[in-house]
Amino acid sequence: MLVDFNFRIIFEYLPLFLTGLKSTFLISVVSIILALITGIIACACRISGIKTIKYPAIAYIEIIRSTPLLVQIYFLYFGLPTLGLRVPEIQTGILALMLNSGAYIAEIIRAGINSVDEGQLEAGTSSGLNYFQRMRFIILPQALGVTIPPLLGQNIVLVKDSALLSLISVMELTRCGQTMTSERFMPSEAFFTVAFFYMCIYFCLKAVADWSQRKLIFREAY
Amino acid sequence: MIEFKNVNKWFGKLHVLNNIDLKIPKGEVLVICGPSGSGKSTLIRCINRLEKIQKGEIIVNKTPVHDKHTNLTKLRAQIGFVFQQFHLYPHMTVLQNVMLAPVNVKKIDKSDAEKIALKKLEKVGLTEKSHAYPAQLSGGQQQRVAIARGLAMSPEIMLFDEPTSALDPEMIGEVLDVMVNLVSEGMTMCVVTHEMGFAKKVADRVLFMDDGKIVEMGTPDAFFDNPKTDRAAEFISKILTH
């Protein structure tokens, strides 16, 4: 099989793949940042005692988690124009990824917060710390440590999910592979290259996550 | 200093506190004992409003604890609380554990708070552990840190919820020693415990609870040697035979 593998054509198409890589990278970074913000806000609403913000947050999280991402992408892609909102494909795609990942991130953060022992909160309460001080000094430093690995996982999922944006003709990495395939009919070469670039992004993300975990996680010394 | 007036509390249908009337004067050491589920922990948890009550009134230093307008931060700053499971913050050093509330609740300058914290750690005999993390300490040491953490707010009242029940037997002594020291300084204390030696040595009164009610209350000698009720006699015989 490797005998037939045409590396020359990959180099010929390299400029196209690099624009695709850049596009996927930008879409991912912007979506991750927006999804983190969405997730933190959704989580804060979800654990709040105020029903008017708690229930909409639950509805949002459950709707996203119970439907496929592709359906959500199509829903926004075809749905927004009918509402009179003409949004470019790339923004539609980022919006979909943000909403989708935000719901999962909200649940990841909530699990991190719940993992902190209730008794420590009571200890904080009894010494007069208010809600925000308990969050700031007791919960978040500990929740952050246990949250980073699953958050990394979610961000990797987001990067790979961005491949679905090729279906609403966003010119990202996977779409480049499709383009090359349709022009030259060399799917092995095309998707080998696509896969290779996704791996590059993955290892970059992993390095960032490892670094941040070393910086942020508290040392429970034994 | 602490007054319960006809206090009632329910967990669902369970009547955990049933018409509690109790006065604890300043400087008194009150030991609370009773079978598990009798409401003794709940009783002291109501004093700093870790638990709400449905009926009656609790007054601490003239402040109604369960009033909507009560400044809880101010109230809780006067009351130290020590838990059975210590509940130290595992991500902070011993010193940071003790300093957290003075710095953030009382807004004491960090360097001053550190001095206070070190003084309290000296009192519980753990100055040399001030930069250790809780997981590096034994159970007894952790509980002593928890006591220092409570003392760092300079409380007028200390509440202890079974402070030695989670400890290995050989560590109980070091924690009780610290508590006996506190008694000699005139601290007002409510201690839920089954340590009869401690009760006999320092308690002014022993309160026996069962089924959410105060069944019997008296001096340690009177209570342990001549219990007035059968229920108390049965309880004492059970804990003394082991």
Image (cartoon, rainbow, N blue to C red):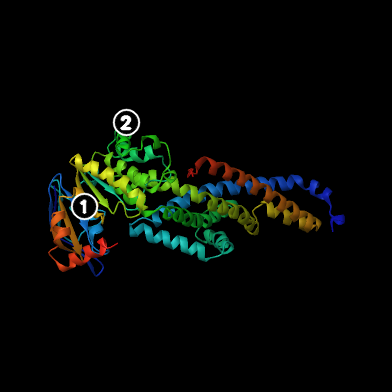
Nearer the observer: mark 1 or 2; the answer is 1
Residue at the extreme bottom: B13
In the drawing, what numbered circle is on residue B118? none
Q: Nearer the viewer, residue A203 or A96?
A: A203
Q: Is residue A130 visible?
A: no
Q: Earlier in the sequence, mark 1 or mark 2?
A: 2
**Marks 1 and 2 on same chain:** yes
The residue at the point 49 percent across, 60 percent down is A83
**Image quarter of the C terminus of chain B:** bottom left
Specify few, some or many for label 1: CA neighbours under 10 Å numbering under 14, 14-19, or 20 or more. Answer: many
Q: Amino acid at mark 1?
A: Ala
> Badge 1 sits on which subunit?
B
Q: Nearer the viewer, residue B109 or B22?
A: B22
The residue at the point 75 percent across, 54 percent down is A192
The percent position of residue A186, horizontal first and vertical second, equals 80, 57
Marks 1 & 2, CB-CB < 8 Å contact: no
Q: Which residue is mark 1?
A: B199
Q: Quadrant of residue B111?
A: top left
Q: Which residue is mark 2?
A: B115
